Amino acid sequence: MTQHDVRSKVPEALRPAVGLASVIVLAAVVAVSVIMFRGDLSPGVPITVLSPRAGLVMNPGAKVKLRAVQVGAVSSIDQNPNGQAVLHLSIDPAQLSLIPGNVRVGIASPTVFGAKLVELAAPDKPSTTPLRSGQVIEATNVTVEINTVFQQLTSVLSKVQPEKLNEILGALAGAMDGRGEQLGQTFSDFDTLLAKLEPGLDNLRHDITAAGVAAGAYADAAPDLIRTADNATRISQTIVERQDDLDALLLSAIGLAEIGSEVVDSNSQALTDVLHLLVPSTDLTSRYREALNCTLAGLLPIAKAPPQPDPGAVVSVSFTMGLERYRYPGDLPKVAATGGPHCADQGLPHLAPGTKPPFLVTDIGANPAQYGNQGVLLNSDGLKQILYGPLDGPPRNSAQIGQPG
């Protein structure tokens, strides 16, 4: 069967329909390929970027890149009532986990006249939380277009008078004529200087910031500084006016120093001996400094108290029971107390009302805080010996001679 026979079997009415279907299928394949290439079929994660402006050549479909790798596209661009540009991004879900949540956003252009793109930049300390769906990010910078430069240059040139500009350019051309080699050497030296200064830019930036703070402090203190300078001027004027008196004072001081030197030199050994003799006294004073401080601090309220309305002294007199009589040998004096001076641990010199400092019992022989006479004693020593056994001898008195017994 020949090809002519096959065509003859196909109805003539179906041939246009078959051709049209072929064209439609071919157009659908191309359209699906384009849509898949643009990524319209892949579900993107919505991210919003707020920017002061979007740039002159920023259109939907612009690329969103991170480290020069495309991670999404711009789906649409809106404008807020305040004039702020709102860019709606569609981020590839597979790339979302690789973008930190504190990512910085900038609108850049690969060329001067090229279309804009959204450039993501990871900060120095990226967060552990990735970018989330619906997050709103503020753009940090927008690349300046050449159109903006031309506009600003036009506004500047409109204020410049052409004849004066011509004179300036002519003067510059005359000044640079024949000095190209020197000018090139100047630029080369300047580049070398900048290369040497570049490692210290961080320190220079810190110094400039600190200089601003220091300048503010000096500005705040300027009135006091001016007043100090004025006072210094007056002092210098006074010194000039009283220079004769100052000379006399210096001469007197020199004479006094010479006499004092003679006195000290001739009595150096005696002064050294006096200082050595004062060491035990100063050591004792240093040891009892807390007690001395308590004493002086306790006398201070009395010294500052207002005087009595009537002259005299106010005393409180009462009768108390007699203390226990001196007994031998139990009350012989001892030098066995330890612990040094006590003051601060007893609340002195400031005591609460109605309180008294505790009595400090030390091993010195007699104890004034022991039990005392509570009344008339009737053969109390015999009663004590009956109750408690033999005790120390009877109280000492001036009439007894020898050992008591």
Image (tube, rainbow, N blue to C red):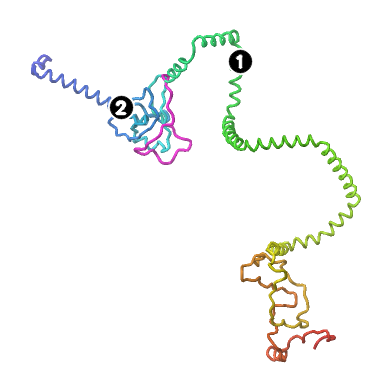
Magenta-span inclusion, residue 171:
no
Judged from the image, the secondary structure of the residue bearing numbered disc 1 is helix
Judged from the image, the secondary structure of the residue bearing numbered disc 2 is helix
Query: To which residue does mark 1 refer?
Result: 185
Distance in Å between CA atoms under marks 1 and 2: 53 Å
> Residue 276: where, in percent of width, then height?
84, 57
> Residue 128: where, in percent of width, then height?
43, 41
Type of amino acid at the residue the image marks with label 1? Gln
Q: Seen in the image, is 290 located left or right of residue 242?
A: left
Q: Seen in the image, is 128 located left or right of residue 363?
A: left
The quadrant in which the N terminus is found is: top left
Disc ID at residue 38 = 2
Type of amino acid at the residue the image marks with label 2? Arg
Prevailing secondary structure class for the magenta stretch in the rendered image: loop
The quadrant in which the C terminus is found is: bottom right
**Residue under the point 41% across and 37% down:** 100
Q: Seen in the image, is 217 located left or right of residue 55?
A: right
Label 1 environment density (alpha carbons within 10 Å; few <14, some 14–19, many ≥20)? few
**Residue under the point 88% across and 50% down:** 264
Q: Earlier in the sequence, mark 1 or mark 2?
A: 2
Taking the view exactly as shown, the residue that stands out farthest to the front is 310
Of residues 190 and 269, the one nearer the viewer is 269
Please determine whether, in this image, residue 331 is positioned above or below residue 171: below
> Residue 165: where, in percent of width, then height?
51, 11
Magenta-span inclusion, residue 126:
yes
Of residues 176 and 262, the one nearer the viewer is 262
User: Which stretch appears magenta?
Assistant: 121-147
